[in-house]
Amino acid sequence: MADALNQAGSDTGARICTLRYCKRESLESGAGEVIFLVIKRGDKVTLYTRRELNQLVAHRDQIFIEELLADMIQRAEASPDELFEHLCHLGVGPVVTDSVRSFETHPNSPGALFPDYFPAEFRRSYPIADDNGSEVDH
């Protein structure tokens, strides 16, 4: 991924923040996989997730990652500048900032530069219960 960013060229106002997921047993070493790309162009933030996200995240962290993604999607709409700056400085927990760089967005789209990623959308993989504990449609 660093090669794609380095080949991308000069700063045209687009910035990318990569977020790395570290399993609990590798938190101290910082070893992990980049699972989210956050691209900021002007006042718009676009989120991308790894195609094999569910295979990369430990089962015990699935709900956390899903809730984090839902929050990021909501905040990207409501306050994109604040979200991007916040994500550029994550340092605690299983998802941390990997890198923040500027890059050229054309003629290649982010999909061409990062084929293992696709635009993020929230899909809950666990049931939601109402106040009585009954499962509800989502």
Image: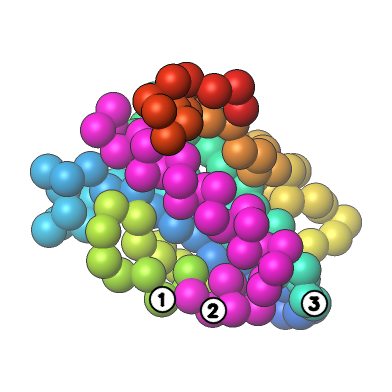
Vertical arrangement, residue 64 with respect to residue 18, above or below: above
Magenta-highlighted residues: 58-86
Q: Amino acid at mark 2?
A: Glu
Of labels 2 and 3, earlier in sequence is: 3
Q: Residues within 10 Å of mark 2 (few under 14, many from 20)?
A: few
Using the image, tell me which numbered label, if any, was put on residue 89: 1
Q: Mark 3 is on which residue type? A: Gly
Q: Are marks 1 and 2 in contact (CB under 8 Å)?
A: yes
For marks 3 and 1, the one nearer the N-term is 3
Side (left or right) of 111 relative to 58:
right
Residue 129 position in % (x across, y down) = 44, 28
Q: Position of residue 107 (x, y in %)?
A: 87, 56
Q: Tell me if residue 46 comes above or below residue 66 in the rendering.
A: below
Q: Residue at x 12, y 58 (%)?
A: 28
**C-alpha gap between disc 2 and disc 3:** 13 Å
Residue 9's place in the image compared with 35, above or below, is below
Report the residue marked by disc 2.
85
